[in-house]
Amino acid sequence: MRLLTTNLNFSLLTENLREKSVQVVRFMTETLRGIIVNYRVGPKSQKPKECIIEFSGVRSSAEASRLIGRKIAWKTGRKKVIGKIVSTHGNRGLVRARFRKGVPGQALGSFVEIIG
């Protein structure tokens, strides 16, 4: 009888873990759209290859850290500039992305999408 109750508790535990892992997978596979807030700037320079991006629904640095390593794309017409999220920025859930080519000034305030 004791063995049966142990198996029952183990099965409940695995069901709870499955539900949590499904929630994480849903978060990671949703199409998240972000807004390019600004370039990464220094006191005397700005870096057009690196941008600060804010994603809707991401409000803390812990949530933003899940996005590190994902590929993003800024699309306009036929052009598509590909980048990668490299780190978090601050405590509000902003991320830093490095693009292969620099994004133009018109990109500020426009949308980017996670592609991979």
Image: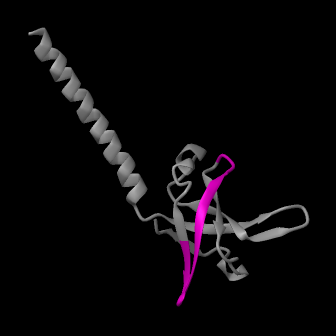
Q: Within the image, what quadrant is residue 17 found in? A: top left
Q: Position of residue 111 (x, y in %)?
A: 56, 73
Residue located farthest toward the top when viewing the structure as drawn: 2
In the picture as drawn, the residue positioned furthest to the bottom comes out as 78
Using residue 77 as the reference point, say whether residue 30 is left or right of it: left
* Residue 74 placement (x, y as % from top left): 57, 76
Towards the viewer: 52 or 98: 98
Q: Is residue 35 magenta?
A: no
Q: Would residue 53 be found to the left or right of residue 1 on screen? A: right
Q: Find the residue positioned furthest to the right.
A: 44
- Residue at the spot 21% in from the left edge and 28% down from the top edge: 12
Instruction: Give the tally of numbered discs.
Output: 0
List x then y, in percent, for residue 77: 53, 89
Farthest residue, direction left: 1
User: Which sits in the foreground, 19 or 80?
Assistant: 80
- The residue lying at 60 percent from left, 51 percent from top is 93
In this rendering, would 74 be left or right of 25?
right
Residue at horizontal 63 percent and vertical 49 percent from the top: 92
Examine the structure image and report whether residue 87 is included in the region drawn in magenta: yes
Question: Which contiguous range is marked in magenta?
Answer: 73-91
Residue 110 image-quadrant placement: bottom right
Residue shown at 69%/49% (left/top)? 90
Residue 103 against residue 45 in the figure, above or below = below
Q: In which quadrant of the rendered image does the N terminus lie?
A: top left
Q: Main secondary structure of the magenta part?
A: strand
Residue nearest the viewer, comparing 45 with 94: 45
- In the rendered structure, the answer to whether residue 51 lies left or right of residue 63 reads right
Residue 73 falls in image quadrant = bottom right
Estimate the x, y position of residue 25 in percent, counting from the top left: 36, 51
